[in-house]
Image (tube, rainbow, N blue to C red):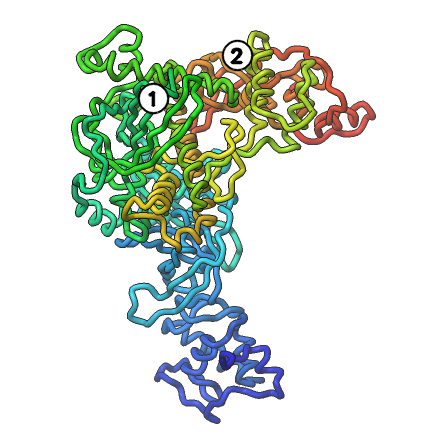
Amino acid sequence: MAPPKKTPSAKKTASAGRAKPKRPAKTKPASKSKAAPKGGLPSKKEIIEFLAGTTSKAGKREIARAFNIKGSDRIGLKALLREMADEGLIAGSRRRLLRPGVLPSVTVLEIVARDEDGEFIARPAAWDDESGPMPKILMVEGRGNLVQVPGIGDRVLARLTPQKPDADYPYHARTIKKLPRTTSRSLLGIFRSLSDGRGVIDPIDKKQLKEWTVPKGSTDEAEDGELVRFEIARSARYGVPTARVVARLGNPEAQQAISLIALHAHGIPDEFPPAAIAEADAAKEVELGSRLDLCDVPLLTIDPVDARDHDDAVFAEADTASDNEGGWIVIVAIADVAHYVTPGSALDKEARKRGNSVYFPDRVVPMLPERISNELCSLKEGVPRPCLAVRMVFDKNGRKKNHRFFRGLMRSAASLSYEQAQAAIDGRTDEATAPLLETVLRPLWGAYASLSKARDARGPLELDLPERKILLDDKGRVRGIATPPRLDAHRLIEEFMIQANVAAAEALETKRSPLVYRIHDAPSKEKLMALGEFLATIEMKLPKAGVLKPAQFNRILADTRKSPNAELVAEVVLRSQSQAEYSPRNLGHFGLNLRRYAHFTSPIRRYADLIVHRALIRAFGLGEGGLTDKEIDELEEVSGAISDTERRAMAAERDTVDRLIAAYLADRIGAQFTAKVSGLVRSGLFVRLTETGADGFVPASAIGHEYFYHDEVRQALVGEDTGLAYQLGDPVEVRLVEAIPTAGALRFDMLSEGRKIASSRGRQRSHSADRSKQRQRGKPRGGRPSKRR
């Protein structure tokens, strides 16, 4: 293959024996403008062709060198370039000229929107206003490359391909590398208009609480107080950063606006492309066909009372086999999403981009359209629904003897809430549960009792962390925060789902089938070392011999459960754990103490589960919709992408809760609250309110009348003069002094005094401690002034 023809840069042309582009000896002006120069100058067409062909910086100097323009002709060139700029033929500064809208072949882009087909639209991450209108760019990713662009707001290094002049988008782009999101700019804020046509933006990011100036012409006609999406621009002449409004998002105090902020801030898509909607609308009910008929099996769905979808159902009965006395047969049936969402379809592409559903207090952003998630794949009571099910046989001690996967057609016997099912077992039946108590519910609890024995023997990590639920009124405002009780009904469903997930991983391994595991690595050596150092400060030891198991952490938690350090130890143990993720390589699940584990039970809301369903269909020959060879080749990339979307969803959900609670507490400035220390940094400490679970910050300047240093070993802020300390998990009293709902930020003053704690071996002094030594030596002190007068 012949090498591609290269266009010499300006620098190479000038140095190659003074060679120069072919041109007429004398070029007449291309227009009759009186500003057109005369003499030995290139034509406008030649200049445009030169700018199009060069790959390096090209300004007036480079053009003059390329065309061998010297002396007084440079004045004529300057006039010619000015005329071309006035006519819109070129743009930029005298040091870098280009055709309007022209971009280098490799550049940094920001994903800003989707088109009607759901494809991502991008724009240049940096653009000079003098270069003309900012071009919109269509991302045309291959299947293997698509996972590098998980959402709006991401920045990518991309390779651009120019299109024909009449194309809808002047460029198509393919991602080379996804770039980390910048922390130097915020993307959402509240616009404040100024009388002279300019404006300012207050970012909603609590880490970027500063104003950005919006010059005239960059406000997008945003109104005062409106929530806007913006980007940071930089003046080409002075380099002063300013903001440019790129989207108006409405009133930030309107109902559902708080979750809307999180969606835009984290780049989570909340509208389905027409192609995906069309596929969902065209989907039809499933008939029995070759499926196993489960319609007479009394499978139940047991979910939260406000569940928006029902994708798992359970059934249990005593095993009558002579060789399994006291054993149980358990069926877990899961909505057959793979029947409707096939590889490569518009629904599949969209689900893959989203990775998972996102749950906010006021809305759900589903992975699949409602026609699929809330209708055809929701296991509604009394309605036939397709399912992928596993039949598991356990002995009396909860050890699994065998399992079998199959496709079926089921009809839910009842849709119960956790509280409803638990009440029936506790003797308070209702119209729905009374007929099911003896024949359906009690066998479920009997099987759970056996599974609990195996669970206790296995010894998973026992971190009892309460979950708080935000209660909203009909206007989307917080009316209260509750901590629902943890019931046996919750534990039953959880254990049945864990066993189904384990069975899926085991079944696929026996077929040597690729799959996506749910992995949870053991704590790192660094985290274990820090945990051991902390435990030593409260006269406890972390076992050093061999590999640590969850049971050893459980013993530490049990030994301190009745001590004043119980919550502190639980917090530190939790922080020592690794983060769970998805991977085609099996590392086991440390927290559950399982050698193999996969997600199988929620394909409506997790793409990982859909992949496992497809793998089972392919491995066991269960019909159409199985995993394709192309998908197998992409499992590594997909696993990384859905791990990212999961973390993105968690961050968005957490941010929304923070903003809702900040709005809830905004009218209680000056109120006192009971709290616990939930985090420590050199600049202050974080507290979590007992009443609401809200997190806020207490600056070091609001703690006491001395300097405090951060003792990382003891997880404490310690006063360098008095030795009084605030330690992770300590109960404290605080006063609310500021609440910023749009940022989800709460600031408190500390009311409680610190306490004496045991000294730490080899403590690390902070800068404040070093300043104390300087003061003792009579040196001038710098930094934050002491509150002591």
Left or right position of 445 against 542: left
Question: Looking at the image, which residue is at 70% across and 28% down?
Answer: 766
As drawn, 469 above or below 277? above
Label 1: element kind: loop
Q: Residue at x 63, y 30 (%)?
A: 527
Instruction: Residue type at mark 1: give it.
Output: Ala
Q: Nearer the viewer, residue 686 or 620?
A: 620
Q: Amino acid at mark 2?
A: Glu
Q: Residues within 10 Å of mark 2 (few under 14, many from 20)?
A: some
User: Badge 1 is on which residue?
Assistant: 321
- The reply to whether residue 355 is visible in this rendering is no
- Marks 1/2: CA–CA distance: 61 Å
Q: Outermost residue toward the right?
A: 777
Q: Quadrant of the C terminus?
A: top right
Q: Could you tell me residue 153's position as x and y percent?
A: 41, 47
Residue 539 in the image: above or below residue 288: above
Going 37% across and 65% down the picture, which residue do you hit?
171
Q: Residue 777, how many percent across, how many down?
A: 83, 25
Give the vertical position of 462 relative to 227 (above or below). Answer: above
The quarter of the picture where residue 761 lies is top right
Q: Where is mark 2, residue-wise? A: 733
In this rendering, the answer to whether 317 lies above or below 518 is above
Task: Tell me which corner region of the image, top left, top right, bottom left or bottom right, holds residue 611.
Answer: top left
Say whether residue 509 is left or right of residue 428. Answer: right
Q: Position of residue 54 (x, y in %)?
A: 50, 75
Name the residue located 28 percent from the left edge and 40 percent from the top edge.
337
